Every structure is written in C-alpha cells, then in structure tokens.
Image (cartoon, rainbow, N blue to C red):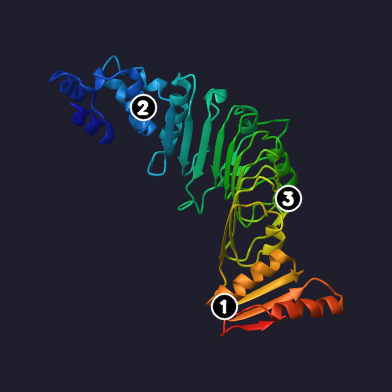
Amino acid sequence: MFSRVRFWLFGSPVDREQVKLELQKGPDRLSELPDALLLEILSLLPTEDVVATMILSKRWRFLWMMVPILFYDDTSNKNIRSFSDFVDRSLVLHKAPIVETLHFVLFYIPVCIRATNKDSVRELIIEIDTSSRQSLPPIILSTSLYTECRMLVKLRLNNVILVDASSEFSFPSLKSLELKSVKYPGDEFLKLFLSNCHVLEDLVVLQCPDDNVITFIIRVPSLKNDDAHGSVIDATSLERLDIHDTHGEYYCIIENNMPKIEEVHIEFVYIHPGTILEFITSAKCLTLCVFIPMYLVWVDYEGTEVEKEVASFILRSAKRLENATIYSKTTDPFKKLELIKELSLLPISSHLQHHY
C-alpha cells in the first residue's frame, strides 16, 4: 500500500475516486503510522504534494496543515497565478504552531509571506531562480520581513532586493544569516540590519557587483563563523573565518584582534595577507590557498614576522608563479633597503623573477 500512495503523491494530478478505490483494496499501512512519523515523512515532500494527500482519507484531510516544513517551488510551474493563489491559500489554512522551515524557490511571483503567522517561522529561505528572468522585474521583499518575521532563527536570501526599513526592527533570535547576490538600499542600511541581529553566530555573504554597498562592514560582537567575500570585520568572538578572493575583486580588513579564533581559511589573489594574519595569531588551524597563476603584486609590505612567513611560503611554494613584485609601505630609504635585504635572503623557486 505504501508504494501505491507514493505513486499518487509524486505522480500526475490525483484523481479522488481512484485513490479511494486503491485504499479500499487493502489495509492502509501508511495510515497506521503515528501522526508524528507521518508529519516527518510529509516534511520531505514539496508542499503541493503534501496538500494533495488531504483526499486520501478522513484522517489525512487535516494532517497536512500540521506539517512543520513547507517547501514551495514554482520554477517548473507554468501557471503563475494559480501557483500564487495556492501559496496564499495553503499558508492561510496551515495550523502548525511552529513552522521549522518555510522555503521558497521562486521564478517570477513576489514571495507570498504575508499570509502566514510570521512569528511561528523559525527558518526562512527565499531563493530566486534567475536562469530565465532576463525580461522579468526583480524580486523586491517588503518591509514585513523586518517587522513580522521577528522570531526567525535562520534566514537565507538569494537573488532578492531588500528595501529600506520604515521603522525600527530587530531579529532577537536570529543566529544564522546567509546573503547571496542580495541588493541593499546602501551601506547604512546594511550596518543597521546586522547591528539588529544581537545573537547572530553564523554569517555567509556573497556580494553581487551592483549591490549598492561600497564597504561591507561586519560589526557583530556575537559572531562566531564568518564566510566573507570582501569586508571590514570587527567580530571579537569569531571562532571560524573563511575569506574568498579567487578573482582579485574583493578585499578584507580586520579591525581588532580575534582572541577566540580557532580556524581560518583564506583563498586570495590580491588580499593583503599580512594585515589579516597579525590579528589571528591564536588560530589553531590556518589554510592558505593562493590563486596566483603567473604573477604576484604585494603592496604596503611592512616586513612584520607574519608577513615574512607568508612571503617566504609564497615565494618558495608557488610553482606556477613567474613574477613577484613586492612594494614596501615605508618611504624611509634606509628602512626600505633593510626590507629588501631581508627579502633577498628568503628562499625562492628557481624559475621565479622577483622585484622588491
């Protein structure tokens, strides 16, 4: 019986009478399971399939309303108006006291989050499919995200536009935040947004070229894990830091020491590693991935112990590096000469051309 039910859940549109006929042929083993287990099973399915189970029997009629995970995907739905109506209706009828995850994968329609009890949602995921959106307007999230989703613990946004807040807001429970290809009203809004996440621990940021942010400033005292692609970081509680700059487009500045840092992973082309490493001396694990196919230009070299270690590692180990140029920060000719002498004593690859 389980296989027959699965067929109807994942197959084409369900025919009420035919499903009832199937149920009459033998005991409904799936329905013999306790509600808690059934809800767990239903949580694995798209919400459209979950709602369709209401016609299986009287017991199933209202069971879908208590499913704690809702997943809406309209990327393969041709009837946009019909899908939008379905989202609205199902959210209005949904009765679960806690929604563990509300997940949207959308192609065109604005996200219909207005119909649900926002304080019941713990994780909100909004992903916009941009593969076929060339002629369509961008997805702009309303201010209800700030005012009516206050009890979120996790928030993931992808390819959306955030609008400026018209009133004060905060996310007192938000611990995990992921922002990928998100556009913001500007620098001040972003600082305000992060400052209102008082217990934020995990942050992932992937900027897009036209996100309206000149300097991405991360000042979050509670932050423990940061995965950044270019930012100014002031997070003294940080335990793990990932910095990515594989195309030489970003920068990273650390403003204060990170005494609790344990693990650091840096992928860079143009990031000034010395200015980062001197703030993470307590790290127990450090991974450096240097993407330098042919040349290296290091500006503002000061000759600190950390910088010398990094320079020595790169000059000695970068097998594909053909040319390295290091510019010292000092303008004092005697100090500059001393730095050149120190650099000339470092071991380098035999094929490498270098300029100090």
Q: What residue is shown with label 2?
A: 40
Q: Amino acid at mark 2?
A: Glu
Instruction: In the rendered structure, find residue 321 and report the number of the disc placed on it.
Output: 1
Q: What residue is shown with label 3?
A: 257
Among the two numbered marks 3 and 2 on one chain, the one whose residue lies closer to the N terminus:
2
Q: Amino acid at mark 3?
A: Asn
Secondary element under disc 1, as helix, strand or loop, is: loop
Secondary element under disc 3, as helix, strand or loop, is: loop
Q: What's the distance in space between the residues labelled 3 and 2, CA to CA?
A: 44 Å
Q: Amino acid at mark 1?
A: Leu
Secondary element under disc 2, as helix, strand or loop, is: helix
Question: x and y percent of residue 277 in the render?
Answer: 68, 59
Q: What's the distance in space between the residues labelled 3 and 1, CA to CA?
A: 31 Å
Image quadrant where one finds the N terminus: top left
Q: Nearer the viewer, residue 179 or 110?
A: 179
Question: Is any part of residue 112 visible from this angle?
Answer: no
Question: x and y percent of residue 284 in the render?
Answer: 59, 52
